Amino acid sequence: MGIFKKAASKVGDRFLFSKKDNTADADLDNADLDTLAENSGATGKALLRTLDRAAKMQSSAIVNYVEWLRSKNQDATPEQIQQKMDKHFKMLVTGTGAGAGGAAAVPGVGFFTGAAAIAAESLAFLDAAAFYTMASGYLRGGDVRDPERRKSLILIAILGSEGSALVDASIGATSSVAALSRMSARNVTKVNNRMTKLALKQVTKRLKYSWMGKIMPLGIGVVIGTVANRKIAKRVIENTQQALGPAPEQFDTPAPAEGSIEEPKATISSNESETEQDS
């Protein structure tokens, strides 16, 4: 098994992850973003595509998701809505992890086919994490209408304390959400560039080691894939809550009337339909 892991690591590094990272941390500010993305391989490029899609996403999709949850749970506090979003996110990404992990166990599916499935799965995970983070930011009063500020919320969740420190230090605020709302557009873009470079380094390392478990033969990858995604999902949730701070004690506006908002099918996994009390 050790020989298999060693060989898989070499192939995975070549086809999915960084060719070689020659950029020292001390030179991060001077590093070219395109070069970093190229060196980080498919995973880094997936992150950049996710940030780009998040910037182009209609803010109404984020707002409708949160308001739909509120309409289904009329008396829920912001913290209780956050817990439901946490549950949705974990269920969604655990499902994608098991799906990609199972690719190697299907008869006739070769190693490289399985690797391609995992690369796509990594992109799906990042998309889910991006939406979850933006919804969590909106729940706390964050501005999800501005594309650059949406990117900031996602990058903060990926980087955790490092991202929070960069944002907070830029304006001296105690909350990243508050800091973002007070920063000029120019400063937001500047901080985003720095956070993106750091994130390219971090996300490649994290997804690499979760990917290692998914290429194990005989169906073992399904179990390891689910566990790995669950661990990364937990980290995203922890980073988001640490970076964005606790949810407000109460909402400023009443919940939308029950049944007034249609379930956002494109956002919620179709196999996690829940009862009104469990949504």
Image: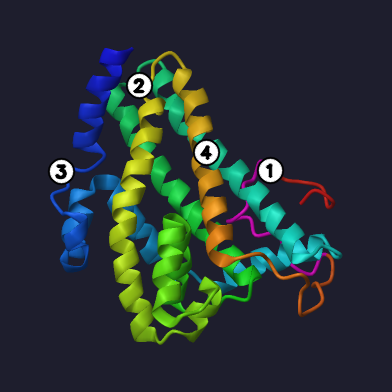
Q: Earlier in the sequence, mark 3 or mark 4?
A: 3
The answer to whether residue 55 of the structure is visible from this angle is no
**Alpha-carbon distance for marks 2 and 3?**
28 Å
Query: In the image, which is nearer the foreground, mark 1 or mark 2?
Result: 1
Q: Left of 242 or right of it: where is 192?
A: left
Query: In the image, which is nearer the foreground, mark 3 or mark 1?
Result: 3
Q: Left of 61 or right of it: where is 33?
A: left
**Alpha-carbon distance for marks 4 and 2?**
27 Å
Q: Is residue 116 above or below residue 87?
A: above
Q: Amino acid at mark 3?
A: Lys
**Alpha-carbon distance for marks 1 and 4?**
20 Å
At mark 3, the secondary structure is loop
Q: Which residue is denoted by mark 1 in the rendering?
A: 272
At mark 2, the secondary structure is loop
Density class for disc 2 (Cα within 10 Å; few <14, some 14-19, many ≥20) is few
Residue farthest along the left direction in this orientation: 22
Q: Earlier in the sequence, mark 2 or mark 3?
A: 3
